[in-house]
Image (cartoon, grey):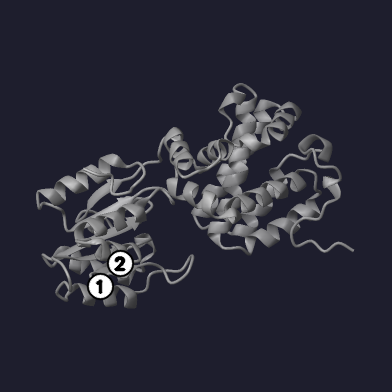
């Protein structure tokens, strides 16, 4: 059997392939796992296996234009999947397949369905059409109604080994140094890693986040609160992205006190070493906890501005000469700050 073009998750591919070969594929599936782990890629590969009877059909599936593939996702980042979208999807599933034996429906970010959307979908999951295969994609089972989860075959996709991600990047022509860095930054999220080598803005955003952190460590409270005010206006995903980049950096600082060979941010060795030398291990561990706590509060719908203000107060204050090799950083403007 082939790997369906899916990087990693071989066990999941083999399970689905075996079920299809035995004509015992479940009609309702729930693919769960962290963002950018490959859930949508696996869903598309499953649809390709069911609908791709020739090259033309496979190409249409990959483009999400096959007449028997119905794909639903939130209208925009952070928005909910509305009941009208689900009703349109369910209507499509009542129709006979156009070209093959199945109609395949994929609901991406299914955890973002409204309650009415989930209830509407539940009725179809209870009495599915024999020619229908439904795949739901969510970060975890807990974000879905238990009644929906109980009617689905759940595949829990886990992060890939860093070495596997690195090898995949090298196979795509990435330079060894770049592949090593991106693989570690990906934390096993192959989708993020592939996007990072294709889209320069991914690593550019990370660089900006780390530059902001450098400036904040040397900034006074007024400038820190100004940064918190600006960041709080961003959408949830962007705030999390910033804080996760900071968290990875500070975890490296903590590692550097004992095992520098395990660093994730390979391109920040000098700065990490300087931070590890300037702060006691207990203080570094506290920074890691503070950022982790902020992420947890935001996940529980805490007020973003308040949570970020508290974090700004807890970040250590370091002279620019200690936290960065860039001269004059302590006087550099933070994003959104007006300089006379």
Would you say 160 lies left or right of 102 here?
right
x%, y% of residue 2?
Answer: 25, 44
Image vertical order of residue 279 relative to residue 26, above or below: above
Q: Is residue 158 left or right of residue 328?
A: left
Q: Visible in this render: residue 158?
A: yes
Image quadrant containing the C terminus: bottom right
Viewer-closest of 193 and 62: 62
Tell me which corner region of the image, top left, top right, bottom left or bottom right, holds residue 225: bottom right
Reply above or below: 250 against 262: below
Q: Is residue 225 left or right of residue 60?
A: right
Q: Report the number of discs.
A: 2
Residue at the location (32% across, 67% down)? 71
> Label for residue 222?
none
Question: In which quadrant of the rendered view does residue 234 lie?
Answer: bottom right
Residue farthest toward the top in the current orientation of the protein: 258
Mark 2 touches mark 1? (CB < 8 Å): yes
Front residue of 189 and 201: 201
Residue at x 65% of width, y 53% of height: 308
Give the labeled residue for mark 1.
Answer: 67
Q: Is residue 144 visible?
A: no
Residue designated by label 2: 60
């Amino acid at each position: 059997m082939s790997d369906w073009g899916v990087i990693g998750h071989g066990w999941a591919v083999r399970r689905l392939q075996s079920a299809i070969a035995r004509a015992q594929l479940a009609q309702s599936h729930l693919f769960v796992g962290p963002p950018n782990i490959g859930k949508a890629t696996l869903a598309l590969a499953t649809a390709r296996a069911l609908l791709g009877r020739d090259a033309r059909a496979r190409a249409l599936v990959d483009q999400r234009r096959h007449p028997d593939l119905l794909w639903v996702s939130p209208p925009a980042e952070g928005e909910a999947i509305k009941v009208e979208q689900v009703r349109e999807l369910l209507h499509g599933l009542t129709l006979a397949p156009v070209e093959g034996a199945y109609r395949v429906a994929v609901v991406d970010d299914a955890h973002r369905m409204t309650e009415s959307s989930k209830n509407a979908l539940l009725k179809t999951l209870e009495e599915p059409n024999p020619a229908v295969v439904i795949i739901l994609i969510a970060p975890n089972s807990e974000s879905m109604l238990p009644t929906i989860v109980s009617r689905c075959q759940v595949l829990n996709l886990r992060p890939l080994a860093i070495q596997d991600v690195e090898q995949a990047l090298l196979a795509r022509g990435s330079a060894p140094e770049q592949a090593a860095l991106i693989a570690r930054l990906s934390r096993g999220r192959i989708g993020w890693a592939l996007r990072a080598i294709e889209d320069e803005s991914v690593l550019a955003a990370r660089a900006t986040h780390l530059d902001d952190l450098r400036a904040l460590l040397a900034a006074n409270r007024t400038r820190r609160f100004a940064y918190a005010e600006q960041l709080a206006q961003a959408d949830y995903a962007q705030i999390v992205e910033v804080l996760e980049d900071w968290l990875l950096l500070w975890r490296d600082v903590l590692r550097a006190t004992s095992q520098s060979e395990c660093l994730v941010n390979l391109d920040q060795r000098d700065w990490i070493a300087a931070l590890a030398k300037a702060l006691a291990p207990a203080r570094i561990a506290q920074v890691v906890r503070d950022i982790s706590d902020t992420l947890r509060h935001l996940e529980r719908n805490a007020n973003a501005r308040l949570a970020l203000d508290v974090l700004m107060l807890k970040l250590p204050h370091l002279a620019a000469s200690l936290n960065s090799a860039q001269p004059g950083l302590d006087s550099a403007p933070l994003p959104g700050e007006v300089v006379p």
